[in-house]
Image (cartoon, rainbow, N blue to C red):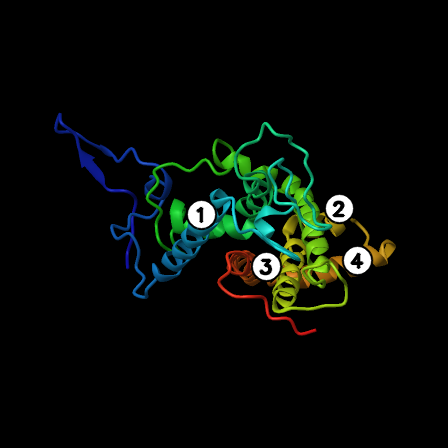
């Protein structure tokens, strides 16, 4: 297929001039009239991604504003932990810390979710996911994006993506609290140790995926070994960097798996706390 430069256009005065376009339709690009030459269902993956992310957003908004059914001893929803508001449900040994006082009248989940959601929204994989699914930049490989201009992550709102490295530290703290909640899940409703229910396994699977996703982060990989010039002088950090690199290769899968697991853990607590069924205890 032969291509040339951008064809001229006729102005209102009858003269011809190049199209004053930018981006993929710029004068320096090949003049291909079609938006793309793909014959496969290129739109399917971004459509599924958009549906999955919208589904999680709708569910998390519902649960965050519900402000109810988030604690059933010994389980506390990961959306509400740590619970730092004054109106938190008392938790036996749990992370219910009255930090904000009585002036905060909204759901305590709104104080917690900003950190894990901020970490995920600025994550390198999730950027790719919603850039294609929502921003259409580009919607798929070899498919022209509809935007006339592209400034990258140098202007609002996309410049806020650069705070990802800072959200990583908050994500570590949240993962630490959820680990504590997982340990507490191996108790019974009277806070006696040595017990395990179905919820304990749900929490255990969730925290494993949360840690795997958090540690597979590109910022974590860079923090461990990104600035080293000589790996031979830092054998421990090199070994850790290699382990994180293996996790990083599965970052996309871990991002989705941990997103599903955290919603599943919250939904399980909701079912038990609302009385839909009792938590099956194994011992």
Q: Are marks 4 and 1 in contact (CB under 8 Å)?
A: no
Could you give the CA–CA distance between mark 4 and mark 1, rounded to whole angstroms? 43 Å
Residue bearing the label numbered 4: 238
Could you give the CA–CA distance between mark 2 and mark 1, rounded to whole angstroms? 42 Å
Could you give the CA–CA distance between mark 2 and mark 4, rounded to whole angstroms? 11 Å
Q: Earlier in the sequence, mark 4 or mark 1?
A: 1
Judged from the image, the secondary structure of the residue bearing numbered disc 4 is helix
Give the residue at x 63% y 41%: 167
Q: Are marks 4 and 3 in contact (CB under 8 Å)?
A: no
Question: Could you tell me which quadrant the C terminus lies in?
Answer: bottom right
Q: Earlier in the sequence, mark 2 or mark 4?
A: 2
Please tell me whether mark 4 or mark 3 is closer to you in this view: 3
Q: Earlier in the sequence, mark 1 or mark 3?
A: 1
Please tell me whether mark 1 or mark 3 is closer to you in this view: 1
Residue bearing the label numbered 2: 227
Q: Earlier in the sequence, mark 4 or mark 3?
A: 4
Per the rendering, the mark at residue 251 is: 3
Judged from the image, the secondary structure of the residue bearing numbered disc 3 is helix
Residue bearing the label numbered 1: 62
Above or below, comparing residue 224 to residue 244 in the picture: above
Above or below, comparing residue 86 to residue 142 in the picture: above
Q: Are marks 3 and 2 in contact (CB under 8 Å)?
A: no
Above or below, comparing residue 215 to residue 114 in the picture: below
Question: Could you tell me which quadrant the N terminus lies in?
Answer: bottom left
């Amino acid at each position: 297929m032969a291509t040339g430069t951008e064809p001229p256009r006729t102005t209102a005065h009858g003269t011809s001039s190049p199209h004053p376009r930018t981006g993929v339709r710029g004068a320096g690009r090949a003049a291909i009239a079609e938006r793309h030459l793909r014959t496969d269902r290129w739109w399917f993956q971004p459509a599924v991604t958009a549906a999955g992310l919208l589904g999680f957003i709708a569910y998390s908004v519902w649960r965050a504003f519900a402000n109810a059914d988030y604690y059933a001893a010994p389980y506390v929803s990961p959306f509400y932990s740590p619970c730092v508001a004054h109106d938190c449900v008392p938790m036996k040994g749990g992370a219910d810390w009255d930090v904000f006082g009585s002036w905060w009248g909204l759901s305590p989940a709104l104080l917690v979710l900003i950190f894990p959601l901020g970490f995920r929204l600025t994550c390198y994989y999730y950027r790719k996911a919603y850039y294609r699914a929502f921003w259409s930049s580009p919607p798929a490989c070899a498919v022209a994006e509809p935007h006339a201009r592209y400034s990258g992550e140098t202007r609002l709102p996309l410049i806020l993506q650069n705070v990802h490295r800072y959200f990583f530290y908050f994500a570590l703290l949240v993962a630490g609290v959820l680990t504590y909640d997982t340990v507490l899940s191996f108790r019974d409703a009277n806070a006696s140790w040595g017990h395990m229910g179905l919820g304990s396994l749900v929490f255990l699977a969730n925290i494993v995926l949360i840690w795997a996703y958090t540690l597979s982060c590109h910022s974590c990989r860079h923090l461990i070994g990104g600035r080293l010039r000589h790996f031979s002088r830092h054998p421990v950090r090199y070994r850790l960097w290699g382990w994180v690199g293996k996790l990083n290769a599965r970052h996309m899968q871990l991002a989705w798996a941990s997103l599903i697991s955290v919603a599943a853990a919250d939904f399980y607590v909701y079912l038990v706390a609302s009385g839909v069924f009792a938590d099956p205890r194994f011992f």
